[in-house]
Amino acid sequence: MNERIPSPQITTIIPTYRRPQLLRRAIQSVLNQTYPDFQVCVYDNASGDETAEVVAEFAKKDSRVKYHCHAENIGAVANFNYGMAQVDTPYFSFLSDDDIVLPDFYATTLAGFTLHPDAIFSAGEVIEMTEQGEVVKAPLHTWSREGYFTPPEGLLEMIRVKPPILTGILFRRELIEQFGFFDDNIDINDYDLELRVGARFPFIVNRKLCGIFVLQTTSYSVNKGTSFLYHGYPQTLAKLKNDTRISTAVREQGSQELTAWLKRLTFRSGLFLVSTKDFEEVGKIAELLASQYQLYTKGRFLRLLVWLGKHFGFLSQLLALIYAFRKAKAKQRNQHLQDDFGNVSSYLSSIVMQLENKQ
């Protein structure tokens, strides 16, 4: 029982929907924090299962755990935003119900704020890991450095590499006042928010491992396909260009970098889809390259590959072999990630054992 904290400093927002067993793991990972002054707020999107009982079990033993259930499913983004609107602590973080944070997450990120009190967020490393325990990515380890970033350096690093994963970010509450909530009209709303934050405010990045982003086979992050090429990224680009709160110089530089990156990503996506024989989608990407980015030659090249792929099946097979070879080489290059972080999967098992012992 933890009754000693009258005024928590951190709110952990956990939106959830019909994942009661994974939710138990997520909540326990927060309760394992070495820094104790937090509250865990679970927002149930009308699951209609044993989710309420799971949270009640924790709340009986630890008053830091709180629960709210919506009368009906309001949608994933709206559920995140609802939790954000309830924050009344100086700091807050998000945790998806299928992910976990490591014990020193809050201690690590709060230490960053101590060094740089003007930072709007402090981020630790989060590895992307499959359900089978294979470490796929450690994004912050590919950044040029760790530490304190000011605009436009932080924004450009996010574009050129990848923004910090939401699971490992501790935000100041001032972010809500400055930026509001996630945009429900953008399917990569966390990316959109982080870019615009990085364009205006300093932030901190720490490569110490703070969380695990589990790649569930049924999750949107794994199955989003190419929809983000047509809507999410172009919308984010437009918002970055048009946000007058961002200095003109930063907007121009950031927009140029993001546009160049999107051109490369879109074309590479088209090449990959030729290898999978998804010729209809390749045609859409060819049109996008021409209409959105004026890359007429690359659009025509993709259409040529579609024609060749339809008439000469070996072309798609050849591309598929090339991508399989590249994937194998990338996996080999990333072996050091498995060596460095592979044992972290055991922490997931230890949480499960911890929960079983409580039952």
Image (cartoon, helix red, strand yellow):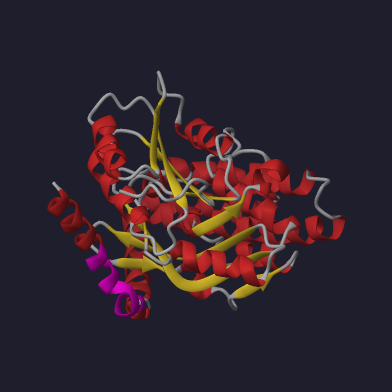
Q: List the single residue furthest toward the right.
A: 248
Q: For the point 53% across and 44% down, which residue is it?
A: 228
Residue drawn at (51%, 74%) of the image: 142
Residue lying at the far front in this picture: please name it. 4
Q: Quadrant of residue 288?
A: top right
**Location of residue 326 (image quadrant):** bottom left
Viewed as shown, does residue 176 lie left or right of 244? left
Q: Is residue 283 above or below residue 74?
A: below
Magenta stretch contains residue 209: no
Residue 304 locus on image (x, y percent): 51, 53
Image spot of residue 343 (x, y percent)? 26, 73
Q: Is residue 338 magenta?
A: yes
Quarter location, residue 331: bottom left
Q: Residue at x 52, y 47 (%)?
A: 7
- State the extent of the magenta-drawn residues as a range: 337-347
Q: Does residue 6 appear left or right of residue 292 in this picture?
A: left
Q: Nearer the viewer, residue 323 or 318?
A: 323
Q: Nearer the viewer, residue 283 or 16?
A: 16
Main secondary structure of the magenta stretch: helix
Above or below, 187 relative to 73 = below
How many numbered marks, from 0 up?
A: 0
Residue 76 vs residue 240: left or right? Answer: left
**Residue 297 appears at what percent x and percent y?**
64, 56
Task: Point out residue 36 in the picture as x, y percentages from the top left corner.
Answer: 43, 58
